[in-house]
């Protein structure tokens, strides 16, 4: 028992989840490190050379290549001792250093659920200013906090029309476990009760594109870190538009134009243009009478968003504008399938691709961004807007004290 206590006391001195003691130091790498599981250990030696190799001993004694970059971020899901070797080639004597990394269980148990919202910026939409609720005097920061409170407590928020987004994370790094899906996101999608449409997985699916980032500078914020899209089923669809950009214009001073039915109280409410020559409007309907423009951003004349536009998925099955069916894509998008279909709401970090569509290998991710991926208007049902609630790390066990979660399986 005393030995265990001593070990943890020593570990506390060396816990190095992105702390200063693992940054560049003149003496080079340490002889050993302690770090909690699912926390990053940034290893950056003082020496420079022509090439670098980070390797780890496998259980059968072989050397497994981890990285060929000068700086390496160590990340482990399970406790244990990992033997790391750093080798540098400088064209002369070179440098080689082997050391153990002892991975400990976290002192405070991690939550499997969303812990933080970093940014909330919806596009205009019929649920904006109500999910979460805007109050006079709210700022971008207070609305970010409201979005965080909602997601942490499993309350739905809206992202508005195409491009509107939220950026969130957990209280730990989500590990990329080979062969397994790593996290899931709850939405409010549902299948139609009409058998034919339900069989085709049609109903109300408002797919959101998911992006991920690793906190490579270890400052706890999604600032200079590179973002990667999780390439879902429609990524290579010829109708998908990569590099899409849309600009919404503030509706100040606009005279409302009603439609003949009276359901749409302003058909020309918020105009938009995109970089593919498209243009249109976010119409206002009789069911949602508040401002559709994010009111904490009222001083901004335009809102511009960039990303991937997915193909339209809405079909007027009635042919007279009374019954729209929004069909689910096979996989890879938020708010795309009902929460009861847990595997279809789950995501694999290994789906990540860079801006050129090239697959990337990430050891884990710290930040997740979801944005509305479809730009379409479906009559009286309004614009297609992604809604999300909390996310869950699938590698963290849900404790019995936490209420049952349809995404827990």
Image: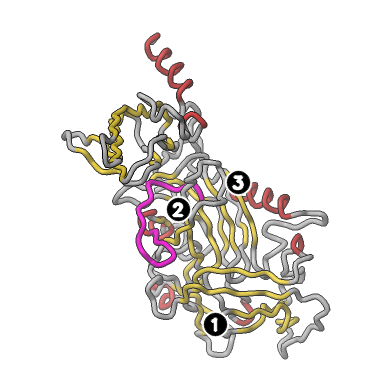
The crowding category of the residue bearing disc 1, from other C-alpha atoms within 10 Å (few below 14, some 14 to 19, many at least 20), is: few
- Give me the residue at 36% from left, 37% from top: 76
> What residue does disc 1 label?
276
Looking at marks 1 and 3 on the same chain, the residue that comes earlier in the sequence is marked by 3
Q: Which residues are magenta?
A: 352-367
Determine whether the residue tagged by mark 1 lies in a helix, strand or loop. loop
Applied colour scheme? secondary structure
> What residue does disc 2 label?
184
The crowding category of the residue bearing disc 2, from other C-alpha atoms within 10 Å (few below 14, some 14 to 19, many at least 20), is: many
> What residue does disc 3 label?
153
What is the spatial separation of the Cα atoms under label 2 and label 1, in whole angstroms? 32 Å
Q: Position of residue 91 (x, y in %)?
A: 27, 42
Q: Is residue 321 left or right of residue 43?
A: right
Circles 3 and 2: CB atoms closer than 8 Å: no
Q: Is residue 245 left or right of residue 55?
A: right
Looking at marks 3 and 2 on the same chain, the residue that comes earlier in the sequence is marked by 3
- Give me the residue at 40% from left, 64% from top: 231
The crowding category of the residue bearing disc 3, from other C-alpha atoms within 10 Å (few below 14, some 14 to 19, many at least 20), is: some
Determine whether the residue tagged by mark 2 lies in a helix, strand or loop. strand
**Mark 3 or 2, closer to the camera:** 2
Q: Is residue 358 magenta?
A: yes
The answer to which quarter of the image holds residue 58 is top left
What is the spatial separation of the Cα atoms under label 1 and label 3, in whole angstroms? 39 Å
Q: Position of residue 377 (x, y in %)?
A: 59, 79
**Mark 2 or 1, closer to the camera:** 1
Q: Position of residue 303 (x, y in %)?
A: 68, 69
- In the depicted structure, whether residue 260 falls above or below residue 326: below
Q: Is residue 363 magenta?
A: yes
**Which of the two residues, 198 or 20, is positioned nearer the viewer here?**
20
What is the spatial separation of the Cα atoms under label 3 and label 2, in whole angstroms? 16 Å
- Give me the residue at 58% from left, 80% from top: 378
């Amino acid at each position: 028992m005393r030995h265990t206590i001593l070990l943890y006391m020593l570990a506390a001195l060396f816990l190095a989840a992105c702390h200063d003691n693992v940054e560049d130091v003149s003496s080079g790498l340490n002889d050993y490190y302690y770090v909690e599981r699912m926390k990053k250990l940034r290893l950056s030696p003082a020496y420079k050379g022509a090439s670098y190799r980070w390797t780890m001993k496998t259980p059968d004694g072989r050397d497994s290549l981890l990285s060929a970059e000068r700086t390496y971020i160590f990340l482990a899901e399970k406790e244990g001792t990992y033997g790391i070797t750093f080798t540098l080639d400088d064209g002369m004597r070179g440098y080689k250093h082997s050391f153990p990394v002892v991975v400990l269980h976290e002192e405070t148990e991690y939550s499997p659920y969303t812990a933080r919202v970093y940014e909330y910026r919806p596009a205009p939409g019929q649920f904006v200013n109500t999910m979460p609720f805007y109050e006079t005097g709210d700022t971008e920061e207070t609305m970010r906090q409201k979005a965080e409170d909602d997601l942490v407590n499993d309350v739905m928020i809206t992202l508005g029309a195409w491009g509107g987004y939220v950026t969130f994370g957990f209280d730990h790094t989500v590990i990329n476990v080979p062969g397994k899906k790593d996290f899931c996101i709850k939405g409010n999608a549902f299948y139609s009760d009409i058998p034919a449409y339900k069989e085709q997985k049609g109903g109300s699916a408002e797919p959101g594109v998911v992006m991920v980032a690793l906190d490579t500078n270890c400052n706890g914020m999604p600032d200079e870190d590179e973002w990667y899209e999780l390439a879902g089923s429609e990524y290579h669809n010829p109708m998908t538009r990569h590099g899409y950009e849309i600009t919404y214009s503030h509706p100040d001073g606009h005279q409302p134009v009603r439609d003949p039915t009276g359901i749409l109280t302003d058909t020309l409410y918020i105009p938009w243009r995109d970089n593919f020559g498209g243009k249109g409007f976010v119409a206002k309907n009789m069911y949602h009478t508040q401002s559709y423009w994010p009111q904490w951003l009222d001083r901004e004349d335009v809102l511009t968003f960039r990303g991937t536009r997915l193909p339209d998925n809405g079909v007027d099955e009635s042919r007279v504008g009374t019954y729209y069916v929004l069909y689910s894509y096979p996989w890879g998008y938020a708010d795309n399938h009902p929460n009861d279909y847990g595997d279809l709401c789950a995501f694999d970090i290994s789906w990540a691709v860079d801006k050129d569509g090239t697959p990337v290998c990430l050891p884990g991710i710290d930040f997740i961004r979801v944005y509305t991926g479809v730009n379409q208007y479906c009559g009286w049902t309004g614009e297609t807007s992604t809604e999300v609630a909390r996310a869950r790390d699938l590698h963290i066990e849900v404790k019995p004290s936490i209420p049952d979660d349809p995404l827990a399986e």
